[in-house]
Image (tube, rainbow, N blue to C red):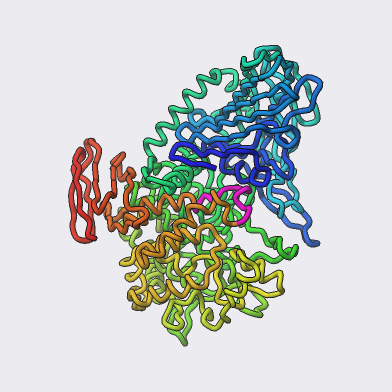
Amino acid sequence: MTATASTWDYEHYDPERERLRESLCTLGNGYFATRGALAECAADDVHYPGTYAAGCYNRLTSTVAGRRVENEDLVNLPNWLPLRCRPVGGDWLTPDTAEVLDHRQTVHLDTGVLERRTRYRLDGERELTVRQLRIVHMGDPHLAALRTEFTVEGGHLDLEVEAALDGRVTNAGVPRYRDLAGRHLTHVRTGTAGPGTVWLRCRTRTSDIRVGMAVRTTADTPLAVGRGHLRITQRATLGLAPGRPATVDKTVALHTSRDHAISDPLQAAVDRVDDAPGFDGLLAGHRTAWGLLWRRAGLRVPGEAGAILRLHLFHVLQTLSPHTADLDVGVPARGLHGEAYRGHVFWDELFVLPYLNLHFPEVSRALLHYRHRRLDRARAAARALGRRGALYPWQSGSDGREETQRLHLNPHSGRWLPDHSHLQRHVGSAIAYNVWQYCEASGDAEFLHTKGAEMMLQIARFWADSAVWDDRLARHRLLGVVGPDEYHDAYPGADRPGLDDNAYTNVTAAWVLARTLEVLRALPEPRRRELVERTGLDAAEPERWEHISRTLRVPFHEGVISQFEGYGDLAELDWDGYRARYGDIRRLDRVLEAEGDSPNNYRASKQADVLMLGYLFPPGELRSLFARLGYHLDEDTWQRTVDHYLERTSHGSTLSGLVHGRILARARRAEAWAFCQEALKGDVADLQGGTTGEGIHLGAMAGTLDLVQRGLTGLETRDGSLHLDPVPLPELSSYGFSVRFQGHWGVELRLRHGRLDIAVPDSDLPALDIRLPDRSVRLRPGDTCRLVLPS
């Protein structure tokens, strides 16, 4: 594999790495995406073609370990890719069945084009080169296209080519889910719609989403249509003269019944593909759309880190593009790149929206609308527990109910085990945090005063109603939760799950309560009155919130912040011994369970938990939060806390290296780069051992972008100003990017050799305040400045 800022290039055919390549070569446009599988290869143990439309879910029931289990999945839609070839009278050619002389697959990041070139040996004299260009159109979100050129050397060749639309797909891309029902499509029908155009329609089994696909295939010779079981084909025979390429173009249109401004998905697809220009015209429009995106989101970082960051940005934009702003969808934790986590929405938006806020605020707003539309479901979940307010689910899908599985498979032991991760109620705090961050960056007072305030109020209300007063401690407590560290979900030997006073949960709950009070005080009086009447907010509630926000308990042990009450009583793990026996112990939980043990018994974390506080809040704000709670958090205590958990974390999540790298950039700069490298290479090197082939880790990818955008620059959007406190790493000290802040499009920032250059583009907007720890500058539109940074 070789990488540059503009290409991601794989040489040779490697079946063992094919799933990884398929994920990293996925093309998408925010509406739908298709994995980078070879067009001639069907789903098997090596290949997994998959096409996923944002928000297209279906629910099925399975029997697992003697129990009926219901799961909702992002649906693998009919496969539009198939295009295969063979010498007339011969076998179909694939890299698994024919001799491959050369193979190369390249993602052109600048233009969103996947190029593939394979050279097959046919017989003693003849060779066939297959070159393909693939796009999923960034200008028109319902279109994709595939151009295939066939060139023979060594003699004339009659080549049979078959293009297809295949409705025989299932959700089978994750081996550990294969005991679960995966046949989501039904009522598959196929037909023709004029010369060269065929179609397929179907619907999802329970969610009843209707899907229409139409394909227009063009070749130099006539096409014959054939129908098989749940698929339709178009075949042509090409007479190839040596050295003279023949081209077959395939253009697809996809619509679902979730789309706006259509009456029938199939008719919409047929009309769209009929109106679509030829491949060259599609490619030109696609390149223009990508050029506009890169102009808004460009990140200029040199070297290997810059190449990886550009790939990360490419995949973020393919999952969450401006087209996403028109959809009712959340942030799928594994992108639109595969079926891991069943396409569900977790808290990963906490790592994604801070980047989008400063480039595509309209997308951030749409993603927050997804949460607001499910506020009633979150309130119902709180009522089911006998509490007021809103309890957002740990895993969300179509309608906002809790989608977290109650059983999960340990591949090490082969056992299905209870899953208690639904107790991660801190997801509500993440949503409130994102509301606030979005509004600070965008200046969207309308959203903050309406939907934002309503969500924050109901989340705050849930925390307040969940808090229990302890007379002995003279403190409020939050009991029976799970923090970000999923290794710990119960006390040793306990007969019920849940932990008490998780520090991250309690501190972020206190932040939500305090910030919501601030929002309520700042609301225009008529709007405040509306909100009070709509939500039934009584006068005693804000007073109670104020009290709880100052009295929530944060446990300590041995001079450090405890991850939860009782953490200090757990045994120490023999880290060296386990590494010597197992090597990679990122998924220590699976190793211990297979031994009949549990990480609940040890001071051992999967990922950052307490330290997430240092990721979300700059040092000054974190100290203020602890002071509000009545605790003194000095630099020594925080440094001891960082050291304590660094020694006891296995980094079983791609988010862990990201969090640790950002914290260490300020705490222990010399060690920060190793963790930044872990975050950068999590997917491209598949550090989690095969998981990337099931879908990229979107939160980690977006988080690395935010690491260089906000983490290393200390950039905060606060009080209508841009605050900066740079901490450049020696390995990443010179780079540049632009941001969109409260109407200012394209504010340029460049760190270089101990200085910071800032340029504000010309406009009729007010001047922009830039604040550093030791000075402030005010830049009018059209101004530039250079600030020398302290060494």
Apparent side of residue 369 relative to residue 163 in the rendered image (left or right): left
- Estimate the x, y position of residue 223 in percent, counting from the top left: 71, 15
Answer yes or no: is residue 517 visible. no
Magenta span: 689-700
- What's the residue at 32%, 56% (across, down)? 728
- Answer yes or no: is residue 661 visible: yes
The residue furthest front is 124
- Is 81 situated above or below 583? above
Residue 360 percent across, percent down from the top left: 40, 42
Instruction: Give the tally of numbered discs.
Output: 0
Residue, far bottom: 472
Instruction: Where is residue 315? Give x, y as percent.
Output: 51, 42
Q: Is residue 673 magenta?
A: no
Query: Viewed as shown, does residue 333 lie left or right of 201?
Result: left
Quarter location, residue 659: bottom left
Left or right: 331, with 768 as reference point: right
Residue drawn at x 56%, y 80% as measured from the top left: 572
- Camera-side residue of 535 and 619: 619
Among the 4 quarters of the image, the one containing residue 421: bottom right
**Residue found 54% across the figure and 48% down from its top:** 684
Q: Looking at the image, which residue is at 71% across and 63% down?
A: 412
Q: In this view, does 359 lie above or below 284?
A: below
Q: Which of 730 and 573 is in front in this view?
A: 730
